[in-house]
Image (cartoon, grey):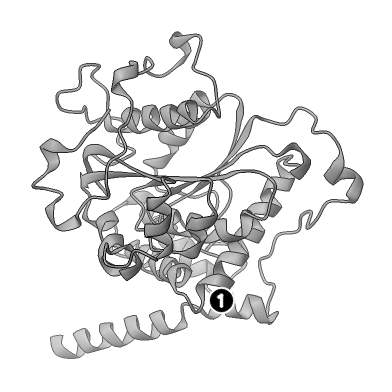
């Protein structure tokens, strides 16, 4: 009996993986526009050339990880981080309502055939974040992330996501004539989808940046079109390290790959946060667990926010906070800024944890 269950589980996984690209292919073929939100698809010539009025200094688009079920439903641990991000970036527009695992920005609980089933799964997950059924959300979204990284289907998928990002940007007041910087902040699977969508968003006159939080990044060609990429990782996070193993373009023996070419051009910084885990205690969003040996007594989540704030400040995208009392924690001293490192060798990250630089 157990053998049949195992065989059935593998068959289900195989069929699910085989069908993963169908949503994006159906969108491309025009078979279905189900769930597509109405919004401004383009600007008039007058709007496009008009001087921006009260536009924010930059736009930060947050693309959640594979645990997200829609553009407004994330795992609970992410909400304090997002509130902290808005406090740290008062002159930026932080956008969180892009669902990166659907080319039409249609959440699993939206207008879908099985939306009621996903709604029940969401209720169970709210009661018990570790619910086994909740893992189906992770599996489904992880497969979409792999579609984004696939050289056959990825261009279609990433075009759809870029289209939705642009639509939401216009709704939030973005005007190409203003050339305001666009920062894609991708957590976990959202990191890969960020660099995939960048290939198309780079056609905008604005500089495009990506900050990856524990992202399992491929060697997507979109990397070459970025103004800059920062990859933040933890040495206790084996999932982000899989990107350097699964995708041959990130191997050192492939010097002509988009990843290695962009690394050679100095447009990728890899920053170690310390002994961060991907999930659970001590993850990137953990606002309760104190960092070991941290002179300021920060939590993991506060240090993540500090690092993002430093990145944007050092890049000249925002000014250093004048009133430190309004910040969640004091600004870092100049000699404690994040130090870019060479790309870590995944197999030895735990061994070298003590040697990795950190702010």
User: For mark 1, what is the residue?
Assistant: 23
Residue at screen point 43% across, 49% down: 265
5 displayed left or right of 95: left
241 displayed left or right of 331: left
Q: Which residue occupies the extreme left position in the image?
A: 351
Q: In the rendered image of this protein, does residue 64 appear above or below residue 117?
A: above
Quadrant containing the C terminus is top left
Q: In the rendered image of this protein, does residue 24 appear above or below residue 304?
A: below
Q: Where is residue 94 shown, x and y percent of the image?
A: 57, 37
Residue at screen point 67% across, 71% down: 34
Q: In the rendered image of this protein, does residue 38 appear above or below residue 87?
A: below
Residue at screen point 80% across, 29% down: 53
18 displayed left or right of 87: left
Q: Which residue occupies the extreme right position in the image?
A: 46
Q: Where is residue 159 shown, x and y percent of the image?
A: 61, 66
- In depth, the one of 339 and 187 nearer the eye is 339
Question: For residue 336, which quarter of the picture?
Answer: top left
For label 1, the SS is helix
Q: Where is residue 355 shown, x and y percent of the image?
A: 13, 37
């Amino acid at each position: 009996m157990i053998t049949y269950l195992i065989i059935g589980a593998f068959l289900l996984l195989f069929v699910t993986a085989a069908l993963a690209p169908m949503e994006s292919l159906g969108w491309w073929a025009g078979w279905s526009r189900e769930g597509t939100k109405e919004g401004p698809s383009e600007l008039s010539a007058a709007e496009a050339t008009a001087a921006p009025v009260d536009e924010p200094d930059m736009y930060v688009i947050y693309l959640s990880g594979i645990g997200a079920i829609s553009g407004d439903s994330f795992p609970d641990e992410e909400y304090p981080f997002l509130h902290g991000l808005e406090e740290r970036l008062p002159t930026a527009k932080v956008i969180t309502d892009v669902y990166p695992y659907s080319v039409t920005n249609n959440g699993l609980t939206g207008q879908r055939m099985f939306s009621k089933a996903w709604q029940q799964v969401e209720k169970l997950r709210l009661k018990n974040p570790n619910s086994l059924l909740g893992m189906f959300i992770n599996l489904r979204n992880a497969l979409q992330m792999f579609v984004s990284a696939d050289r056959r289907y990825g261009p279609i998928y990433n075009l759809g996501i870029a289209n939705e990002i642009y639509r939401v940007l216009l709704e939030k007041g973005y005007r190409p004539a203003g050339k305001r910087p666009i920062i894609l902040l991708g957590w976990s699977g959202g990191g890969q989808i960020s660099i995939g969508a960048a290939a198309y968003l780079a056609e905008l006159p604005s500089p495009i940046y990506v900050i990856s939080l524990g992202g399992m990044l491929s060697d997507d060609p979109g990397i070459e079109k970025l103004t800059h990429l920062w990859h933040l990782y933890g040495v206790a996070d084996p999932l982000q390290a899989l990107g350097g193993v699964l995708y041959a373009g990130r191997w050192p023996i492939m010097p002509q790959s988009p990843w290695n070419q962009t690394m050679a051009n100095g447009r990728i910084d890899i920053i170690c946060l310390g002994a961060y885990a991907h999930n659970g205690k001590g993850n990137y969003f953990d606002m309760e667990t104190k960092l070991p040996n941290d002179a300021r007594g920060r939590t993991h989540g506060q240090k993540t926010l500090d690092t993002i704030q430093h990145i944007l400040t050092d890049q000249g995208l925002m000014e250093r906070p004048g009133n430190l009392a309004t910040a969640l924690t004091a600004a870092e001293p100049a000699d404690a800024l994040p130090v870019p490192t060479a790309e870590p060798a995944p197999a030895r990250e735990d061994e070298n944890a003590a040697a990795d630089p950190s702010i």
